[in-house]
Image (cartoon, rainbow, N blue to C red):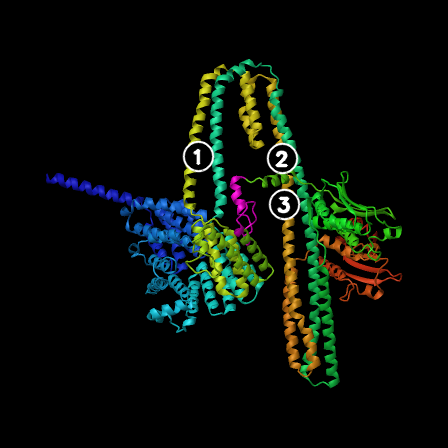
């Protein structure tokens, strides 16, 4: 017996050893190390982000075979990424949690961190989606909490408490008080005994404000302070938590910014404040000290979001002590030290609102308004009911898809059942020899559809081609402006040599030892240099002013009838003179500048009115020249008319015969069109007139085309669907909320609406006191409307609303029918006016009401339910569709078993062809159709059909599809190349535009920062010539400033220089622009890399001295300096430094300009195209001469 027991014990022991070895072999190799590293990483969450990241990376490297450890490490890394505001990286780590692990606790933590991301980025719907997932996981974990190992239990407690904190934070920011309190009440402080960090989190969230609601204001304030001081002291223990130290200090700072609150708390908590006030700061600076310490802690900890928030809190402290500039500096740090904070709209909005206040206090109204509008825009973009639009569309889409699919499947089932009874009979009745023409109808439809699509494609291609032409025109204009900016920079740089000369003269004056006569000469020379510099500055200023009035074209396609309608509205001025204005309707479409076209019509029509006596008639009409693709617009009158001399000079600038500058401007606009693009080559303006019979002015512009797609879009935009109607209702201007409606409103609301409009326009016009008066009137009428509905009501709107007694909010909560958009308007406009008037209390109260009312109006309390509804709807749809499809799939089987043997082979083939025709008319791609047709009509089917006719039908269908594939590939290849070219042109244009703006700013800075010095130098010399040292210091400073700014401008201009043949053509356009007859002679010599191009202006309007100075700083036309700059840059780019321009005066009064340019460059210039473009203005002769090298063949 004893032996049997011993044997049994040995067997059991062996089994236990084997089992232990088995399970140890199956467990992860580094589970202990990974868990330890992850625990250490978690413990450092709120102490050191860098250490948290390093430890989590180590755990990640060891956890390839340990999914739970891998997921925990990813969660730790996501925590670091969120703190650094690298939300993209955080999302990647959280996605890895879902991909690599099925541990519900780690997945819950990932969902909670996703909730925090959504809260930061104001993604409301996504927040509720993740919250719903997290709540499901919480319920699942709650069922097994008692069975969890200690380590997983701690992780579960952390996940539950973090879920409650994140949810309460979200509800706090969207001002949903009840859900916030419910979330915080879910936290069990006793369960957090072993997790100090989460307990600190709990204390901070209760003490930071809003969570304690019972008691008087001072009782709530004291309770919150108790929570915060406990949080700070616990976080400052032997192993401190700098993150929670900073949060507690920042929250205490916010609590003591108000003087009354500060005095109350210090009086009742003196030992605590003595403990906190380690730097012995006075009471009024204590809030700023705490905020600065919090900022230092957050900065060293590395949390980007909290650092920006600390800057904002410090700015509020500076604001309270009226140090507005320091407040603004802090806000700029908050906004621009790290651009990542722009991912958090709510934080940026609060900073913008504070910046608006700071700028207003500094009397910078423009920047204050800018930041105010930015704040309002952010409020608008992040409001909760933005989700309503997406929800309405999604619910409509889901309902539509579900209904359509169910109806379609049921219909197919019904049709199939019916066909089971009649299909066989119908097929037997039809002849085997029936005509195939019926089978070819879908093919004909398909070919017609393809032809229509090809026509639409050609229209789109033509439109894109025109768009490319427009973009090319813009790029060319930007290139011309860029080279002009570079010329200005070079021109400005020439001042440096004169500054150096002045400095040299002053240096010699400082050394002394010279006679009085020499010193006077030096002073005189310095004054002459000052004159030269001032002349240069004046030239540059005039140059800039001259270019400000240049004409820019905005080319677009538009209906001419729209302009005719506007012209017809001005018939009153004609009728007052006894003249009838007749505007004939037209359906013509123009491609031109809409505003300039209207200007030309009005100018010519007004000119006709002036010269037409009473009883006369002015007719405005248009004729489409289809053969030339142009539209001719004519204005005809039966007035005085013109004689031949007047007719010859009607568009002449030098003639002053009484027609004014309007017609001259019309002529200039037409010339501008011609220079813009070859598309406008046939643009023209003409006049026909006879004395006593009247005149006919006409101008031609290219015809445009309004695409059918645009018309359909316009049509459907007028017929919104039910789900789109709500979206349209919210698309009004945010800054002026209400708009007129067709519904008649009560009188009091109408008056309030009118006064709100008046307040808005009063603010626009800068009459801020009147704005407040209008707002008072609007409130009065709103209160009257309230009392008309609630005669004994006590909630009335006031100018300075107090917290807890805001009438508008009570009205909204009581569902009082009134115009809340008007209320939002007057509160916003009152805040703006108070901001401008520096009435801070009025601003604070009105802005608070505006923000709270806007939040409550846009709050969406149904998002949570909506997410669950979406899930249920999705599951129901899937189940219904699967069941119906399974039912549908049973029908072919029944058909096969019951009828297949009785179907004749020929009719089987016809069915196949019908199926092919259905495929042909389906929405699938042609390639997919061909593949499906090949599977249906294979060689076996073809043999069984035994019909040449049916085979011919299928062959024709396949050929049509193959041709369609080839055509589509070819068309879209062309379109893709065109779009690539458009994108390239857009990119180049944007790059040039930015470069031009930067250069413009550089030049503006150079001009404004240095224009004072020459006059100051002159003043010093004339008033105090003996103070040489001050003069030297002034010139040295002048030089340093000028050098710095000009160097900056040169650096910006340097990267834009390249060989551009458009600029070379611009060079020659400048050289021929000032004459009516010009000759160009191109001379090249074998072996010589340079070509000499002689441009002779036969009738130059300038004298010999002016001609000689064409390319000097004293030029009569700054465009010659642009030409010189282009020639210089060509030399720099080609490394042929001999390039340049010179000018001499001919004996016959002509001007001869010599351009030395590289031969290779000159050969690629399109002189013939230049001649063609300028043929209407300049008589141009072009000759080329080739010289042999005289040294050729000589040894």
* Residue 980, numbered circle: 3
Sort mark 2 into few (<14), some (14-19) or many (20+) by Cα contacts within 10 Å. some
Label 3 element class: helix
Q: Which mark is residue 982?
A: none
Task: Tell us which disc is closer to us: 1 or 3.
Answer: 1
At 50% from the left edge and 20% from the top edge, which residue is drawn?
Answer: 419
Q: Residue 43, image x and y in percent? A: 35, 57
Question: In this figure, which residue is indicated by the disc labeled 1?
Answer: 877
Residue drawn at (72%, 47%), measured in percent from left and top?
A: 567
Q: Earlier in the sequence, mark 2 or mark 3?
A: 2
Q: Is residue 353 above or below residue 904?
A: below
| Residue 952 point in image, percent of width and height | 62, 21
Figure quadrant of the C terminus: bottom right
Q: CA distance from mark 2 to mark 1?
A: 36 Å
Q: Which of these two is toward me, 489 or 161? A: 161
Q: Main secondary structure of the magenta part?
A: loop
Residue on which disc 2 sits: 968
Q: Who comes first in sequence, dot 1 or dot 3?
A: 1
Distance Cα–Cα, label 2 vs label 3: 18 Å
Q: Residue at x 51, y 44 (%)?
A: 726
Q: Position of residue 894 (x, y in %)?
A: 44, 20
Highlighted range, magenta: 721-749
Q: Nearer the viewer, residue 566 or 330?
A: 566
Q: 353 or 879, which is in the foreground?
A: 353
The answer to whether residue 674 is visible is no
User: Of marks 2 and 1, which one's residue comes earlier in the chain?
Assistant: 1
Q: Is residue 642 left or right of residue 630?
A: right
Task: Rate crowding at label 3 as few (under 14), some (14 to 19) or many (20 or more) other CA atoms within 10 Å.
Answer: few
The answer to whether mark 1 and mark 3 are in CB contact below 8 A is no
Q: Residue furthest left?
A: 1
């Amino acid at each position: 017996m004893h032996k049997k027991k011993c044997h049994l014990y040995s067997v059991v022991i062996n089994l236990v050893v084997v089992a232990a070895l088995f399970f140890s072999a199956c467990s992860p190799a580094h589970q202990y190390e990974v868990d330890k590293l992850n625990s250490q990483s978690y413990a450092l969450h709120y102490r050191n982000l860098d250490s948290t990241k390093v430890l989590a990376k180590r755990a990640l490297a060891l956890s390839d075979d340990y999914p739970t450890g891998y997921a925990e490490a990813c969660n730790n890394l996501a925590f670091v990424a969120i703190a650094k505001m690298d939300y993209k990286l955080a999302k990647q780590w959280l996605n890895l949690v879902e991909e690599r692990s099925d541990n519900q606790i780690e997945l819950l933590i990932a969902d909670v961190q996703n909730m925090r991301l959504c809260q930061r980025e104001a993604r409301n719907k996504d927040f509720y989606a993740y919250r719903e997932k997290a709540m499901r996981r919480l319920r699942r974990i709650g069922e097994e909490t008692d069975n969890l190992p200690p380590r997983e239990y701690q992780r579960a407690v952390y996940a539950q408490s973090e879920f409650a904190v994140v949810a309460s934070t979200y509800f706090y920011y969207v001002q949903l008080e009840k859900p916030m309190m419910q979330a915080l009440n879910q936290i069990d402080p006793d369960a957090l005994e072993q997790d100090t960090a989460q307990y600190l989190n709990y204390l901070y969230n209760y003490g930071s404000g809003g969570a304690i609601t019972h008691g008087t204001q001072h009782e709530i304030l004291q309770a919150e302070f108790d929570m915060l001081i406990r949080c700070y002291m616990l976080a400052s223990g032997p192993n401190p938590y700098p993150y929670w130290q900073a949060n507690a200090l920042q929250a205490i700072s916010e609590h003591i910014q108000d003087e009354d609150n500060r005095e109350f708390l210090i009086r009742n908590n003196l030992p605590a404040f003595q403990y906190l006030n380690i730097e012995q700061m006075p009471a009024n600076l204590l809030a700023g000290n705490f905020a600065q310490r919090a900022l230092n802690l957050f900065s060293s900890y590395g949390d980007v979001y909290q650092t920006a928030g600390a800057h904002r809190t410090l700015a509020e402290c500076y604001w309270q002590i009226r140090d507005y500039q320091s407040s603004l500096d802090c806000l700029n740090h908050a906004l621009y030290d790290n651009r990542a904070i722009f991912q958090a709209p709510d934080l940026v909005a609060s900073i913008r609102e504070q910046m608006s206040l700071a700028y207003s206090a500094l009397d910078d109204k423009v920047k204050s308004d800018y930041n105010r509008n930015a704040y309002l825009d952010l409020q608008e973009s992040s409001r909760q009911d933005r989700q309503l639009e997406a929800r309405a569309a999604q619910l409509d889409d889901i309902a539509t898809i579900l209904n359509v699919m169910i109806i379609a499947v049921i219909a197919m089932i019904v049709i199939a059942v019916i066909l089971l009874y009649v299909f066989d009979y119908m097929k037997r009745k039809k002849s085997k020899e029936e005509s195939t023409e019926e089978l070819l109808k879908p093919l004909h439809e398909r070919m017609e559809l393809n032809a229509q699509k090809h026509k639409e494609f050609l229209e789109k291609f033509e439109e894109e081609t025109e768009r490319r032409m427009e973009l090319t025109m813009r790029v060319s204009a930007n290139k011309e402006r860029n080279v002009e900016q570079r010329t200005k920079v070079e021109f400005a740089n020439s001042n440096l040599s004169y500054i150096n000369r002045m400095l040299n003269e002053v240096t010699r004056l400082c050394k002394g030892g010279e006679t009085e006569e020499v010193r006077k000469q030096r002073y005189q020379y310095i004054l002459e240099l000052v004159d030269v510099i001032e002349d240069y500055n004046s030239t540059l200023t005039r140059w800039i002013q001259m270019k400000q009035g240049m004409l820019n074209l905005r080319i677009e396609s538009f209906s001419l009838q729209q302009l005719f309608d506007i012209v017809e509205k001005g018939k009153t001025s004609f009728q007052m003179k006894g003249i009838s204005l007749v505007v004939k309707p037209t359906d013509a479409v123009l491609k031109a500048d809409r505003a300039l076209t209207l200007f030309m019509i009005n100018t010519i029509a007004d000119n006709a009115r002036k010269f037409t006596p009473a009883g006369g008639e002015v007719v405005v009409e248009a004729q489409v020249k289809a053969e030339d693709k142009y539209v001719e617009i004519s204005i005809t009158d039966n007035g005085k008319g013109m004689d031949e001399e007047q007719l010859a000079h009607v568009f002449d600038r030098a003639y002053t015969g009484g027609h004014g500058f309007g017609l001259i401007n019309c002529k200039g606009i037409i010339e501008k069109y011609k220079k813009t693009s070859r598309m406008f080559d046939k643009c023209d303006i003409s006049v026909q007139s006879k004395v006593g019979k009247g005149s006919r002015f006409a101008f031609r512009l290219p015809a445009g085309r309004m695409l059918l797609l645009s018309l359909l879009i316009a049509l459907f935009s007028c017929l919104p669907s039910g789900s789109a109607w709500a979206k349209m209702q919210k698309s009004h201007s945010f800054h002026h909320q209400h708009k007129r409606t067709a519904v008649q409103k009560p009188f009091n609301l109408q008056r309030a609406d009118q006064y709100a409009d008046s307040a808005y326009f009063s603010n626009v016009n800068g009459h801020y006191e009147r704005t407040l008066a209008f707002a008072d009137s609007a409130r009065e009428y709103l209160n009257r409307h309230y009392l008309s509905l609630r005669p004994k009501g006590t909630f009335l709107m006031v100018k300075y609303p107090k917290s807890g007694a805001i009438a508008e909010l009570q009205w909204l909560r009581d569902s009082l029918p009134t115009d809340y958009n008007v209320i939002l308007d007057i509160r916003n406009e009152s805040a703006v006016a108070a901001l401008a008037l520096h009435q801070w209390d009025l601003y604070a109260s009105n802005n608070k009401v505006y923000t709270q009312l806007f939040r409550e109006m846009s709050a969406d309390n149904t998002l949570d339910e909506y997410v669950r509804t979406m899930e249920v709807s999705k599951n129901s749809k899937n189940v219904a569709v699967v069941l119906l499809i399974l039912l549908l799939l049973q029908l072919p089987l029944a058909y096969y078993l019951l009828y297949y043997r009785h179907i004749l082979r020929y009719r089987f083939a016809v069915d196949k062809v019908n199926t092919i025709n259905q495929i042909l008319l389906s929405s699938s791609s042609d390639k997919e159709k061909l593949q499906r047709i090949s599977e249906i009509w294979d060689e076996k089917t073809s043999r069984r059909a035994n019909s040449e006719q049916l085979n011919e039908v299928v062959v024709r269908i396949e050929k049509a599809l193959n041709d369609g594939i080839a055509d589509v590939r070819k068309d879209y290849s062309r379109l893709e190349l065109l779009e690539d070219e458009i994108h390239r042109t857009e990119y180049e244009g944007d790059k040039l535009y930015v470069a031009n703006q930067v250069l413009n700013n550089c030049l503006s800075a150079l001009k404004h920062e240095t224009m004072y010095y020459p006059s100051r130098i002159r003043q010093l010399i004339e008033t105090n010539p003996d103070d040489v040292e001050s003069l030297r210091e002034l010139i040295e400073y002048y030089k340093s400033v000028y050098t710095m700014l000009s160097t900056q401008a040169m650096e910006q201009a340097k990267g834009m220089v390249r060989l551009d043949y458009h600029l070379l053509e611009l060079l020659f356009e400048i050289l021929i622009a000032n004459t009516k007859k010009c000759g160009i002679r191109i001379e090249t010599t074998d072996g010589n890399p340079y070509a000499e191009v002689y441009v002779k202006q036969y009738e130059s309007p300038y004298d010999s001295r002016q001609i000689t100075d064409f390319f000097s700083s004293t030029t009569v036309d700054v465009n010659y300096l642009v030409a010189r700059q282009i020639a210089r840059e060509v030399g720099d780019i080609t490394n042929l430094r001999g390039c340049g321009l010179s000018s001499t005066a001919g004996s016959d009064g002509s001007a001869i300009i010599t351009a030395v340019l590289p031969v290779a460059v000159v050969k690629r210039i399109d002189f013939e195209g230049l001649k063609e473009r300028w043929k209407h203005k300049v008589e141009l002769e072009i000759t080329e001469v080739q010289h042999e090298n005289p040294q050729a063949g000589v040894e």
